[in-house]
Image (spheres, rainbow, N blue to C red):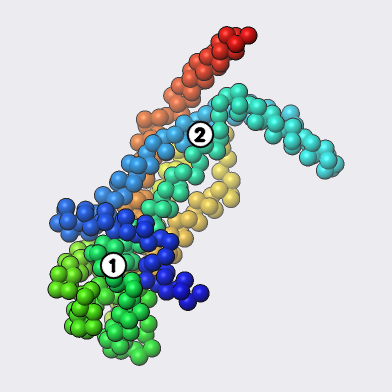
Amino acid sequence: MNNILLAAFSGTGFLAPLYWVFGKCMAFLMELIGNQYFIAIIIFTFVTRLLLLPLNIRQQKTMAKTTRLQPKIKKIQDKYRYTGNDPRERQKNQQKMNEEMQNLYAREGHNPMQMGCGPMLFQMLFLMGIIGIIYYPISYVLGASAFSDNSEAIMKTILPIYQGIVGDDTAKIQNIQLNILEHFDSYKTALQSGFAGIFTDSMCEKIKLYRDGMSLFSLDMTAIPHWKNESGGFNTLVIIPILSLVTSLGSSVVSTRIQKKNNPAMQQQGQMMLMMLMMPFFSFYIAFRVPAAVGFYWIISNIVAILQQIFIFKQYPPRKAQAKIMVENTIERRSREENIKKTK
């Protein structure tokens, strides 16, 4: 258990290869655009959304085909709907309905589950990679690969200094690499003295430049947002979780409206509405538990998602997509019939 915790703490473990790949990409981008950290995050987000575009278009087509088949699906459901109390008859009818549905999908060449989870899984993978390079930039972006093996010793070295900074002998450091970025000027001498092979003059300069790049409009993106700052006043960093909530709600609303237009028969059930609201508010809660840079990524991702959904809807409107699918299905069905005739 201790080894697992240490691996998670230091940014090692099974996600390390993912962090390494994202770290190299981030380092290349930052070198290319002159250490502009937030522009690099925006480029990352646009690239992943572009990669997702073919999957989302295919998902839209699948949804259009499912909508076109709704009358036939409803007819099958009505035919085998059982209102009695006999569990055997209910199971028998359910099996017959499933068989009819499978036959329908086979005739139409349709798989309603096709590409259903692909975009979501890809987004989750990308999010984990982004969080990795935000939490462990010294190891994976700046290239101090020996940091992970020495993280425990580094922690022991800087902890007393940190406790002196905050005036609390019991204070703990939660995210060591972000903490080093935040208080690097205070740690620099001790780190160079104790870990000269890691914190070389060149590495210290890289850390300073990287740290400077993580400030946006005087907001420290390495910090975790709180409603109040250290002096008890309003902390402007809470704008990040708030914008994360607003853009996430916007993305959910746009997605729901598009689904409604794709399938007018869709009912806005209470459970669906609850799910639509739950995820944005969950991200709002999490945004107060992670560095502001993660929230910034969510904001950009939500904005790009909204634009992408509108683009797909405009380029592939439901009626046009359904009409095209009908033509494609007719051509495919006639082709199958011709092949069957030839084999006889």
What type is the residue that disc 1 sits on?
Ser
What type is the residue that disc 2 sits on?
Met
The residue located at (16%, 53%) in the rendering is 33
Left or right: 35 as drawn, with respect to 108:
left
- Label 1 SS: helix
- In the depicted structure, whether residue 127 falls above or below residue 170: above
Q: Is residue 295 visible?
A: no
Q: Residue furthest bottom?
A: 169
Q: Is residue 3 visible?
A: yes
Tell me, for residue 206, which label it has, or none: none
Q: Circle 1 sits on which residue?
A: 145
**Of 165 and 83, the residue lying toward us:** 165
Residue 104: x %, y % from top left? 63, 26
Res 131 quadrant in image: bottom left
- Label 2 SS: helix
The residue located at (56%, 26%) in the rendering is 109
Residue 250: x %, y % from top left? 40, 49
Q: Circle 2 sits on which residue?
A: 63
Q: What's the CA distance linking mark 2 and mark 1?
A: 46 Å
Mark 1 closeness class: few <14, some 14–19, many ≥20 residues within 10 Å: some
